[in-house]
Image (spheres, grey):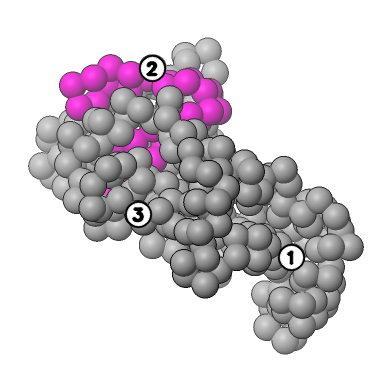
Amino acid sequence: MADGAESQAGIYLTGTTRHLPAGRDYEYFCDAVADLYVGIRPDVPDGRFDADFALYRLGDTRLGFLSTPPDPASRRGRSLRRLPDDAVFVNFSRAGWTLDHLGTASAVPAGSAFVVDNEQPFRIAFDPSRRMRLYSLRIPRAALGPVTAGTIRRADETVTSSETGRHLATQMSLLATMIDTGAVTTAALMAPVVVGLLRLLLHPDDRHAPTRLARLMDISRSRLTDPGFGLTALARESHWSARTVQTAFAAEGLSFSDWLTGERLGLARAMLTDPAWENRGIAHVAHAAGFTDTSTFFRAFRRRFGTTPGSARHHDAPGLPGR
């Protein structure tokens, strides 16, 4: 059955159909996830429909995780009329899947992100030999600037080959990993980066595109957990020179190195106070947040927050004194 869980960080619905009889399991699944996956229904299965699902609030976005039998699913005209929805979805799976959408049939490679316009009909299908595990981030259209079906079609034509598309896939993979480990608070920090990268993918050349600095920040935030990422890597991936990158930050009174360290420190602090990371050592957290040297991390953390990582973990953790 489903469990609404307002008290859990970001989780507002979890459930399973494994305890229900055949037939009722499918009906219950369709009803339970309708608030996020508006109007989307799997095909009626021949037998049981053993599904697990969880829905999360991640700031202004919503994320759904589904583990189901590999039955195809659709959103069609009747559903569009009965349950209109102007959201855009970024879907991610570690296995390949196919999408028939906006007049195009696409084979989505494993580990890629793909964009779906929920105002338009579509049909998705999965490898029939394995369970479907799908992570789907629902983003309000208003957060993305002017978006049409044509905009999304053009974005999907380049999402698996462009630099921005690869960054989007990397960030969705990181977000999925945080969800898998229960680190919902940390996942909530990553969701806005997905939104920023999607905006860049949708509007690469026009006035609705992020500024140069915003683009650089979005790329960097998608790589915070990579200890090898720095100025040289950002210059290479943005196709701008290192001097241009530094100038873009300096124009706003920022140092790229200091800004990157600050972003990593913020991520580390979120991890330290996330219950999902409470059994991980501080050195492990430091490395997961992109620091190569633990002593450097300790010094930077104290300078930034005026306390040690251990003290922050104790005093800032939800439910503990000092929160």
Element at badge 3? loop
The stretch drawn in magenta includes residue 33: no
Q: Is residue 82 left or right of residue 19?
A: left
Q: Secondary structure at mark 1?
A: helix
| Other residues around mark 3 within 10 Å, as few (<14) / some (14–19) / many (≥20) | some
Work out whether 31 lies above or below 281.
above
Indicate the quadrant where residue 120 lies. Answer: top left
Q: Which is nearer the eye, 194 or 38?
A: 194
Could you give the CA–CA distance between mark 1 and mark 3, rounded to whole angstroms?
A: 31 Å
Of the residues shown, which amino acid type is indicated by label 3?
A: Pro
> Circle 2 is placed at which residue position?
107
Labels 1, 3: front one: 3
Residue 51, percent across and down?
49, 35
Q: Give me the disc on residue 272.
A: 1
CB contact under 8 Å: marks 2 and 3? no
Pointer 2 or 3: first along the chain: 2
Q: Label 1 amino acid?
A: Leu
> Residue at position x 39%, y 40% from top?
90
Residue with the mark numbered 3:
210
Q: State the quadrant of the C terminus.
A: bottom right
- The structure residue drawn at horizontal position 65% and vertical position 65%, both measured from the top left corner, is 258
Q: Position of residue 9 (x, y in %)?
A: 57, 65
Tag 2 or tag 1, which sits nearer the N-term?
A: 2
Residue 88 lies in the magenta-colored region: yes
Question: Can you see residue 160?
Answer: yes
Please tell me how crowded label 1 is: few (under 14), some (14-19), or many (20+) other residues with Cα within 10 Å: many
Instruction: Identify which residue is drawn at 51% across, 47% down.
Output: 219
Q: Residue at x 43, y 51 (%)?
A: 215
The secondary structure making up most of the magenta span is: strand
